[in-house]
Image (cartoon, rainbow, N blue to C red):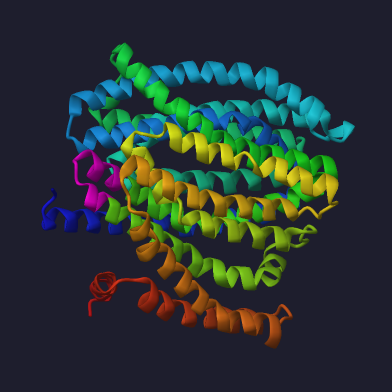
Amino acid sequence: MNPPSTVSENNKRIAKNTLMLYVKMAFTTFVGIFATRVLLQALGADDYGLVTVIGGVVTMFAFLSGTMSASCSRFFNFELGQKNTERLKQTFNLTQLIYVGLVVVLLLLSETVGLWFLENKVVIPPERADAAFWFFQFSVVTFLLSTLSIPYSALIISHENIKTFAWITIFEAVARLGIIYLLSLSSFDKLSFYGALLMIIGVIHFSLNYLVCRLKYLESRFAFFWDKRRFIELLAFGGWNLWGAMSGLFTNVFINVLLNNYFGSAVNAARGVAQQVSGAITSFTTNFMTATNPQIIKYYAAGDLPQSHLLTMRASRIGFFLLFFFALPAWLLMPFVLGLWLEEVPDHTVWFTRLILIQVVIDALSYPLATQAQASGKIALYQSVVGGTLWLTLPLAWVLLKFFSAPPESVACAAIAISCVCLGLRLLLVRRCARLSIRAFVGKTILPACLAAGVAVIVPAWLAFSVMPTPSWTQFFVIGSVSVLCSVPAIAFLGLTRDERSAFTRIIRSRLKI
């Protein structure tokens, strides 16, 4: 059992790392929003839609690397939690071997299945076929480099060296903005040239992660190690994660292809913009979870289940509030925000974005549950059930489009319904694999989250839809201010415990030197 002083120090580290990630996020969000506007203007809606679809085809195999990323992060954190440096080094070396083999497999799949899919299932104007082919090839190389980077970035995060992780991400954001500027000056075909520039960034990103680990962490230096049992353990863990991660393939890539076939690439552009907006807002939660995940797993590895469970419930609730705080005004002001951001807003973008925001707010409650399941190591049943349920998003969306002639936004409604079902399933399964109480999670997380959100939304929603529904700067400032004024007290007094309010008050006073 960890003494109170250790728990306090860990909580301070989480707060410090979260703050650093928010600095990173604020910068990268600003750059990303500006870059999307310029990129959409430079490429046009059709080519931007092709970037969304082709990029999805390339990363349709990302579920493979994603599963191994979750596996190596879990095992790195677990060995650090048990303070077993030798096993950590052995695990890292085995992970490197696995990733080299994985890259070979991904290359073969990309150049066979992926290329066939691009040429036969994606609607591409004939005059853009060559440019699309080269963008695909450059994207494959970029994707493989990002796959090779995963063990190194996972090690950096497991050591909770968030400052270095943040600086690498900030560099990547600046570089992406720079290449869009070069794109506007270039006389080359913009789609294929954009792919080549992204590949160069991928090379630099991999090199930075590799050099940081090589210089700071001795366990990252390759020394051949083989243990059949450990190798199988890593692959088995990754294999079960594979089943769950394939949901990403269905819900992101194939839905893009489905929309492309039914409505054309312009709708893909609308969904791509919506995902950019929701991704920027979701980063408030994902950054917090990046700082929190190592501690959840380390507590579990040290045998301190009560503290691991407490941190899981707290992370779920606070992560939800961090996302809701920014999602509420964004949802209400979406027509104005998109009109201000983009010179020409693609059709369907407003409601695509609003519906995706609802989905990610629901999913925010689930992120720490997934981490708790990973910490237990007992993920076979969890991934089988949750992953299988997430697969249902695609057939449900297809039925809506084919048999009910539903609008494009209906695919987002299907995703919302599946997310609600999966939240309930995750609770049942995490109780089984990690002994987390459903009653405690509902009472300490879901009910306070729903109560605070329900109270906070009443007044700003009334203003947005009844009093000032027309987009304007007046609407922006009034509804934005009211959303903050309603959210802060609702979250503070209905969503946080007394101890959490006191802790936040101390942090604010220390920062303001009060």
Q: Out of 460 and 247, give the one closest to the viewer.
A: 247
Left or right: residue 351 versus residue 452 is right
Residue 160 visible, this angle: yes
- Residue 320 percent location from the top left of the image: 45, 62
Residue 194 visible, this angle: no
Please identify the residue farthest to the bottom as the structure is shown.
Answer: 467
Quadrant assignment for the C terminus: bottom left
> Residue at point 41% right, 70% down?
448
Image height check: is 236 above or below 364?
above
Left or right: residue 371 versus residue 454 is left
- Residue 210 percent location from the top left of the image: 38, 29
Q: Out of 103 and 411, give the one closest to the viewer.
A: 411
> Quick check: is 303 in the magenta stretch?
yes
- Residue 99 percent location from the top left of the image: 44, 21
> Residue at point 22% right, 36% down?
80
- Residue 374 percent location from the top left of the image: 37, 38
The secondary structure that most of the magenta stretch takes on is helix
> Quick check: is 127 in the magenta stretch?
no
Query: Quadrant of residue 300 in the image?
Result: top left
The stretch of residues the image draws in magenta is 294-308
Please identify the residue farthest to the right as the structure is shown.
Answer: 126
> Residue at point 41% right, 23% down?
236
